[in-house]
Amino acid sequence: MTVQPTEEDYEKAKELVEALTLTRIELLKTYAALNEKAKTEKITADDYNRAEKELNERTWAIRKDVSELLDKLGIPTTDNTEQLKNFSGISNDRIEKWKSVNPEIIEAIANVKNLDDAFRRDYLTNSPQKNLTIPENTDTPEKLLATLLQNNTGVAIGDWHSKTDSIYLIHNNMKTLKNAGVDTIYLELDEPSFSNFKLMSIAELQDKLNNRTPEERKRSAEINAKNNHTKEADDDFGANLHLFLSAKENGINIVNIDKIGSARVF
């Protein structure tokens, strides 16, 4: 049964929105400060991760308080997600207003020149030289990867999030990577999905692939399109099933390099 909110409940809701907003603004200020620090000092991913870890912990504590307030008011569990989104939506509006009166901070975050300069200064000075010499008969992805890995310590492969070509490029050439000495693939993937794939055994991955329906593949593509704001997208869930399966079959480890939780969203 829904309960009529009291004045105290309204005040609590205002406090939670304010806490969420201030926490996120603090992270934006931290980003700007790190950008400035990069001009003269060495910075690492840990500088960002520490701030984001703290933000995650504080944000999830706020979300817990929101859930408790909704429970007290008798908001059905099915409506909780939407109610939580409403809190985030109000906070988003406040963040946008804050940005409009603090454009210099947003500009500092958007300008990555300091970070680029720091990365070159601190990490590329003694990095291995690239050798991009490709023989004329290099006419397949397999030959290209084998050649690059013969002459370099690793290969970076870019991707378009709504498409799965890059994932299948790796999947289809996993044996080539293994034969070239590759033992680790670094992947950008949201943490819940990564953990799900990582925990599945070879048999479980294969079973999941074998039993997927056309409807499931279509739904995965639709979700991918929505997440990446495109009209159409590929079935990335199926592509990642293939990737993790072939990696495990070839004894290649996959390490996630994406963000975790709230900081990633905000």
Image (tube, rainbow, N blue to C red):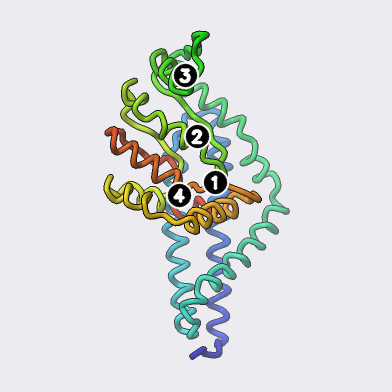
Residue tagged by mark 3? 144
Instruction: Kindly state the secondary structure of the residue where label 1 is placed.
Output: loop
The Cα atoms of the two marked residues, 3 and 4, are separated by: 26 Å
Q: Earlier in the sequence, mark 1 or mark 3?
A: 3
In the depicted view, which residue is nearer to us: 41 or 177?
A: 177
Confirm or deny contact between disc 1 and disc 4 (CB under 8 A). no
The Cα atoms of the two marked residues, 1 and 2, are separated by: 12 Å
Q: Earlier in the sequence, mark 1 or mark 2?
A: 2
- The answer to whether residue 15 of the structure is visible from this angle is no
Residue 166 badge: 2
The Cα atoms of the two marked residues, 4 and 2, are separated by: 14 Å
Confirm or deny contact between disc 1 and disc 3 (CB under 8 A). no
Q: Residue at x 50, y 82 (%)?
A: 75
Q: Amino acid at mark 1?
A: Asp
Instruction: Kindly state the secondary structure of the residue where label 2 is placed.
Output: helix
Return the x and y of residue 154 as percentages of the image width and height.
41, 22
